[in-house]
Image (tube, coloured by chain):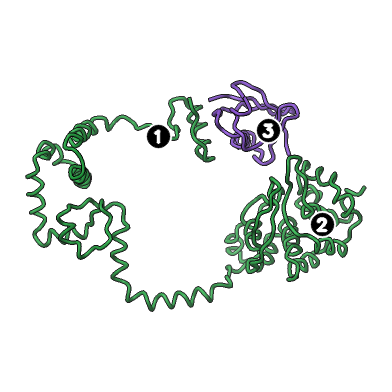
Chain colours: A green, B purple
Amino acid sequence: MANRTDPLAKNIRGTNPQNLVEKIVRTKIYQHTFWKEQCFGLTAETLVDKAMELDHLGGTFGGNRKPTPFLCLILKMLQIQPEKEIVVEFIKNDDYKYVRILGAFYLRLTGTDVDVYRYLEPLYNDYRKVRQKLSDGRFSLTHVDEVIEELLNKDYSCDIAMPRLKKRWTLEQNGLLEPRKSVLEDDFEEEEEKEENEGIADKSEDEKDHHRKSPERERERDSDRRRDSHRHRDRDYDRDYDMDRDYDRERGRGRERDRERDRDHYRERDRDRERGRDRERDRRDRARRRSRSRSRDRKRNETDDVRDRDEPKKKKEKKMREDGTDHPDPEIAEQNRLRASLGMKPLKM
Amino acid sequence: MIEVVLNDRLGKKVKVKCNEDDTVGDLKKLVAAQTGTRAEKIRIQKWYNIYKNHITLKDYEIHDGMGLELYYN
């Protein structure tokens, strides 16, 4: 009797409003002492008093999944179904943040999409800290706006599956909502103006940065590095810059580089082979070999050459992927794909 | 790689391939992917021993082909 929904209550999403909470969680709440003692015979007014006493939010916790008082009050609200004005009052009140979150949660469960966006988005500006009870019983720190973000974007919170919410841009396109105006928009505009004024002076430096960060640059020779050290200060040792190549070729240094390359004896073997291939890869290989020879044994270098020579022959053999998703057995490959998507290591055969 | 059988005695019986050094939490994620329930809602037991999430299957001595009980929170 105490657990039955108010007979005057409307159906929410086609069903008894209490069914929004799953059967198992609902049963746990009904058996809990907080529900039996404190939530018996609550009305909308007395519910406010109980809500003001809340000091943390959360779903179920512990080995036997005890519900938090927050969750019990949510179920109570679903049972008595307060008016929309009352819920909006809960949200608008500024003094008690847990009452606010309670109202917001209830609205997310029962309100229409437009209402949800309209009433919950202003709560993004509330940065107060709240205490959240995790499922293993510990407390964690979070903020009101983080909770609201979770309510609006995720489909599961506090052990209750949220009803589906239409995306904001769908509602905007249908004209039911205006595009979101952030409270920080004015601050951003001010900052943008400041940056524009300062940005003109820094433009040349930015260009260099752009080149430096590009990953597909070729390797460069030490001599060029030395020559151009005045232009690039903190360089990555392994990168080459197209800018430099063009710069060099313009100044007639390009031909010099080719000649110097021919001169090195261990490259003559490969020169004919490589003429017809991708020049970038050549330069990269050559530079790798070049940089290696500077710091390591010649012997090591020769084995590299042998490996490089065999590499194109083995090009057709497929490389086995690390996470085992291309295992010959399709079942195992599928399992490994699932494990990779969950962030686990592949199956050990 | 071992294969464990999870049965909830109400019609859901799943076989899951996993490593011995996977934790029970990982196993729950795999079961969730196969059955469609959420991983947090699953409880894996053997008689009255509820298996904890952070312990590996090897430490619980779960071997290949062993049957576990599937319950829900």
Mark 3 surroundings within 10 Å by alpha-carbon count, few (fewer than 14), some (14 through 19), many (20 or more): some
Pick the front one: B54 or A253: B54
Residue that numbered label 3 is attached to = B51
When the figure is inspected, residue A251 is found, relative to residue B71, above or below; the finding is below
Residue A115 location (% of width, % of height): 70, 64
Tag 1 secondary structure = loop
Q: Are marks 1 and 2 in contact (CB under 8 Å)?
A: no
Residue that numbered label 2 is attached to = A77
Pick the front one: A34 or B6: A34
> Which chain is mark 3 on?
B
Tag 3 secondary structure = loop
Residue at the outermost top position = B65
Residue A262 location (% of width, % of height): 8, 45
For image coordinates 30% across by 69% down, the residue present is: A205
When the figure is inspected, residue A178 is found, relative to residue B27, above or below; the finding is below
Residue A123 location (% of width, % of height): 66, 67
Q: Amino acid at mark 2?
A: Met
Residue B63 location (% of width, % of height): 60, 22
Measured in 3D between alpha carbons, the distance from the residue under mark 1 to the one under mark 2, in whole angstroms, is: 53 Å
> Which chain is mark 1 on?
A
Mark 2 surroundings within 10 Å by alpha-carbon count, few (fewer than 14), some (14 through 19), many (20 or more): many
Residue that numbered label 1 is attached to = A321
For image coordinates 72% across by 52% down, the residue present is: A58
When the figure is inspected, residue A344 is found, relative to residue A234, above or below; the finding is above
Does residue A82 appear left or right of residue B54 in this picture? right
Callout in the foreground (1, 3): 3
> In the rendered structure, which disc, 1 or 2, sits on the residue that comes first in sequence?
2
Q: Are marks 1 and 3 in contact (CB under 8 Å)?
A: no
For image coordinates 75% across by 58% down, the residue present is: A106
Measured in 3D between alpha carbons, the distance from the residue under mark 1 to the one under mark 3, in whole angstroms, is: 33 Å
